[in-house]
Every structure is written in C-alpha cells, then in structure tokens.
Amino acid sequence: MSLNRRLFLQQLGTTIGAAALGNILFPSHASGKEFFNPDPVSPPINASDEDFWAWVQESYTVSPNIINLNNGGVSPQPKVVQDMFEKYNRLCNEAPSYYMWNILNQGREALRADLALFAGCSPEEIAIDRNTTEALDTIIYGFPFKPGDEVVLTKQDYPNVINALKLKEKRDGIVLKWVNLELPMENEDDIANAYISQFNEKTKLVNITHIINWIGQITPVKKIAKAAHERDIDVMVDGAHTFALLDFRIPDLDCDYFGTSLHKWMCAPFGSGLLYVKKDKISKIWALYPDANPLGDKITKFEALGTRSFASEMAIGGSLDFHLAIGSKRKETRLRFLKDYWANKVKNLPGIHIRTSFKPEYACAIGLVSVDGKKPGEVVQYLFDEYKIHTTGIEWENISGVRVTPNVYTNLRDLDKLVLALGKLSENMKK
C-alpha cells in the first residue's frame, strides 16, 4: 500500500470513526475534523495517483455493469453515507415522531455549523433544504419585487430557475433581461460584460450560474457581482455544480444568495441541499414556506418545510467528512484531470468535437462532446447500447452535444471505453 493511500485511509478512518462513536444528537461531529488537515500538502497526492484513487473508487457501490458518466445529474453516495442514512432511517421507524422531532431534529444545528465552516460563512447564514431549485425558488418567490423591476439572467441558465422567473414575470410584472452566451467562452471580461451590459437603474437582481450545467462553463461570478453591487443590484448564484467540486468558499463569490444541491458533488443523500443568504439580506426575503415570522432575520425561517427525510439531512455530515478526507483541492484537480484525460484523447478524431474549454479557469469535471452527423440522443443511445456507458444528451438553446461527467469513483479503464466508443464513431464516418 502506498504512503498516499495509507494517509487517506488514516484520515478517513479518523473522521468517520469519530462520527460513529459520537452522540447521535450531533451526527456531523465537528470535533472529528480536528484530527486531520482536510487538504494536506505533504505528502502530496497527485491527480493521476491511481493507487490512491482506486481506494476511493472502492468506497462506492456503483454497478459494475453500467459506466455512469452522468454524475452531473445526481451522484451516488459512498457506502459509509448509505450506511449512515440507513441507520438514521431505521431509528426513525422505531418511533417516527419521537426520533425525528425530538432526537434527530436537534442534530441540525451541529450540521449547520459544519456546513458553515466548510462554506466559509456564519451558521446564521446557512439553511438546510432539499435541492438547488428549492433554494433559489425561495429567493425568487420571496424577493420584494415591484412591477417593472428587472432581473438579468441567461438563456443557458437552469430551466427550473428560468421558469420560476418567468412565472414572476407573468404574475407580478417583472421584466426579464436576457443574456445569450456563445459557449464555450475563454475571456472573463467578455462573459462579465455580457451580464453587465444589461444592468440599469431598474435592475434589482442578477442570476449567475457558477458552472453552466449543459457544457461545464465556469463563469466569473465575483467580477459580475462586483459590478452589480456597485449599482445596488442583488446577486443570486446557482451553485448546483460548484459546491464541493471547485475549491472555494461562498463569500469568495461576493454574492447575496447561493443555492446548491448536496446530492451532486458532495455525494450526500438524494434530496439534500443548502441555501446561503447573507446575514443582512435575510429579513428582506419572504420565506417560501413561512414560519410565524416570515420577514424575520433568522435563517431558520427558511426551514419550515414540515415533515421531510431527517435521515437524509443527518447523513449529510458523513458526506462532508468523506469529502474533507479526500480534500477539496485534490478532488477538484482529480475531476479536471478525468475530464481532460478522455477529452484530449478524442479531440483530434475526425468528426469529434469537444465543446468545453480545456483551460482550468473555465471548466472542471463536465465535458460536452458532439459527433458530426449524429444527434445527441443518437450518440447517447449508441454509447449505452454498445458499451453500457450512461451519459445525457444536451439540446438547449445554442448548445448541442453529449454531456460526460465522471466522478471520483470513475476509473481510467471506463474512460478508455468511452474513448474507444467515440473512436468507433469517428471510424464509421469514413465508411
């Protein structure tokens, strides 16, 4: 066993072991994190150290018969998180209303503190919800718009966000100002100016998708946010594809509101998410599911969801521990390495086109590939029928291709099969 692999085992064992021995009231166990450095610099673990990453891969229970390259939709949980979820779920079933509300519900504050520590903000700014849609809808429906107020967004934003804003447009008379990005883009000034050019005295909110899910484009959020705040415009960030993928802290973005799905790159239980609201903005936003004080200044007003999966919430702590044991920067570097690994091997094949940037500041794990003469759906079907490779076809606005999204459990052999499959498609064009 290599030193790097042994280091990870020691870190993970310490962290998860501390969680297993801790009080059930505090499932995320912040104290367990005191025993290790989440991003050790010595000895370094390289993105291509397959011995280390093989152990990470073995921590998952993914099917050996399907190559899942659609982690951009939702990611599987490592086994330790599945076990934690099942433990809490079984406990709840012993006496649901007692264990859910009197026991597990108390663990939310410890979990909130851990998530806030990781996110780089105050626990008073973090609400635990179910996904990015719920988080951003909370802001959209709770924002004090007046008729004629303008919102800047792009045609490449996520449909659920677009549809919520379109509803506000129809119901409340706000005005949507559209940006149409020609992706991929590799000049942050050009990207920022596309948003900024739409700002005026009527603009009240701008929605910025941190990573555009269709193609993997990273946007310069902070540059756009700075220009927005100079004009007294609030900034909402769709962080569905960046939280626990890119190594950053939410305040680094200079945003007012941030939503993410923890069941994506954090590999948390399905239906778990996070909403960040800057402290001085909380009282401005009406709660989507109101408590007794919907215009209060407490972040918990956004958590009046009624009955939900307490097991899913409490197992988030195990996902955070697992992520930290790998290390944020190491994980980001590995996932960018995986995208570049397969994309570099096919980029010069006749008829094969990579539609995602290779520059690290503009892309990470997600890659989009198109094949001449083939619709995205046809390529998706071919990959699955012939090689059992699961991907997703993208046809949205001016973006067309097949999205390929590996995760930390993806091995190079599986990516080599993708390369082989795309190579066969390229060869067939010559016939």
Image: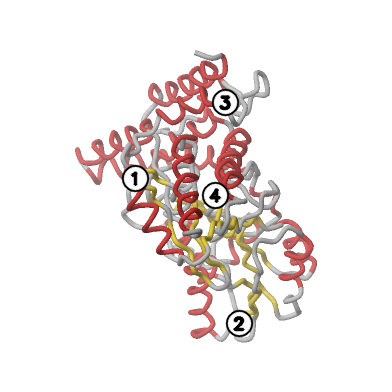
Q: Residues within 10 Å of mark 4 (few under 14, many from 20)?
A: many
Give whichever of 32, 192 is nearer the camera.
192
Helix, strand or loop at mark 2: loop
Residue placed under numbered mark 2 in the picture: 146
Q: Amino acid at mark 3?
A: Asp
Q: Give the label, 3 or 2, closer to the camera.
A: 3
Q: Give the label, 1 or 3, closer to the camera.
A: 3
User: CB atoms at circles 3 and 4 under 8 Å apart?
Assistant: no
> x, y (%) of residue 300?
49, 53
Q: Amino acid at mark 1?
A: Phe
Q: CA distance from mark 1 to mark 3?
A: 37 Å
> Is residue 162 among the parts visible in the rendering?
yes
Tell me which corner region of the image, top left, top right, bottom left or bottom right, holds residue 107: top left
Residue 175 marker: none
> Is residue 299 among the parts visible in the rendering?
no
Q: CA distance from mark 1 to mark 2?
A: 37 Å
Left or right of 60 on screen, residue 43: right
Residue placed under numbered mark 1 in the picture: 310
Q: Earlier in the sequence, mark 3 or mark 2?
A: 3
Residue placed under numbered mark 3 in the picture: 49
